[in-house]
Image (cartoon, rainbow, N blue to C red):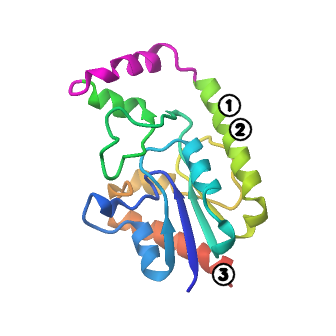
């Protein structure tokens, strides 16, 4: 059976660990032997770590859902470390702001984001990690599908951009509604078929 490796952030994670329904990764898993290590809320650094921990030689196609430059890596999240979907989440400003009332311990992190976090530096570091991922995947480039969900990011080769689908079809599984998940599934399935021909 065709083997697919999926990694990345919440756009590719298996949301069925917490919610009922089927996102596009589950639809892909209905068609292929899928190993999905994507995790909700992770930074690009953790996506890099997902890739270096895998033996990509054993897969017929690799799907990477890249993420925003504005996430700060942490070994353990102060709020979500016990959450089944977000256990490996990194620090995200909007997420922390939502947690501020019930988790006063995050106030100092919010202060850092609001007063010290440097966007230019974050984008520079993100680009360096993306370059490292491109270099790591170079020998597999014929079978890598990069998913770009955010505007003005590093320009990955062989990429699909679902920004418009995200705007038009937001929902509760992988951030898409049923229609959005079917669109993403269809596009990724087409790319996989091109790769494994």
Residue occupied by mark 2: 128
**What is the spatial separation of the Cα atoms under label 1 and label 2, in whole angstroms?**
6 Å
Residue 19 location in percent, x, y?
A: 26, 60
Residue 5 location in percent, x, y?
A: 56, 68
Q: Under tag 2, what secondary structure?
A: helix
**What is the magenta range?**
101-118
Q: Under tag 1, what secondary structure?
A: helix
Q: Which residue is nearer to you in this view: 68 or 35?
A: 35
Q: Is residue 6 above or below residue 116?
A: below
Residue 105 part of the magenta-drawn span: yes
**What is the spatial separation of the Cα atoms under label 2 and label 3, in whole angstroms?**
30 Å
* Left or right: 1 as drawn, with respect to 176: right
Instruction: Work out which quarter of the rendered image holds the N terminus and state it.
Output: bottom right
Instruction: Work out which quarter of the rendered image holds the C terminus and state it.
Output: bottom right
Residue occupied by mark 3: 196
Residue occupied by mark 1: 124
Nearer-N-terminus badge (2/3): 2
Name the residue: 44% across, 33% down.
Answer: 91
Name the residue: 44% across, 75% down.
Answer: 29
Q: Residues within 10 Å of mark 2 (few under 14, many from 20)?
A: some
Q: Is residue 83 above or below residue 26?
A: above
Name the residue: 44% across, 52% down.
Answer: 39
């Amino acid at each position: 059976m065709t083997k697919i490796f999926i990694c990345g952030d919440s756009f590719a994670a298996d949301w069925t660990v917490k919610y009922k329904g089927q996102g596009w990764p589950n639809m892909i898993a209905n068609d292929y032997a899928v190993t999905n290590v994507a995790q909700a809320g992770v930074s690009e650094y953790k996506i890099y770590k997902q890739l270096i921990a895998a033996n990509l030689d054993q897969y017929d196609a690799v799907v990477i859902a890249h993420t925003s430059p504005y996430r700060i890596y942490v070994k353990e999240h102060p709020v979500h470390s016990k959450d089944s979907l977000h256990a490996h989440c990194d620090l995200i400003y909007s997420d922390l702001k939502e947690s501020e009332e019930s988790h006063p311990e995050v106030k100092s992190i919010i202060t850092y984001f609001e007063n010290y976090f440097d966007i230019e530096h974050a984008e520079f570091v993100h680009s360096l990690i993306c370059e490292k991922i491109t270099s790591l995947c170079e020998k597999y480039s014929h079978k890598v599908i990069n998913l770009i969900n955010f505007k003005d990011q590093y320009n990955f080769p062989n990429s699909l951009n679902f920004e418009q689908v995200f705007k038009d079809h937001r929902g509760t599984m992988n951030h898409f509604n049923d229609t959005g998940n079917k669109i993403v599934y269809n596009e990724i399935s087409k790319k996989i078929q091109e790769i494994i021909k």
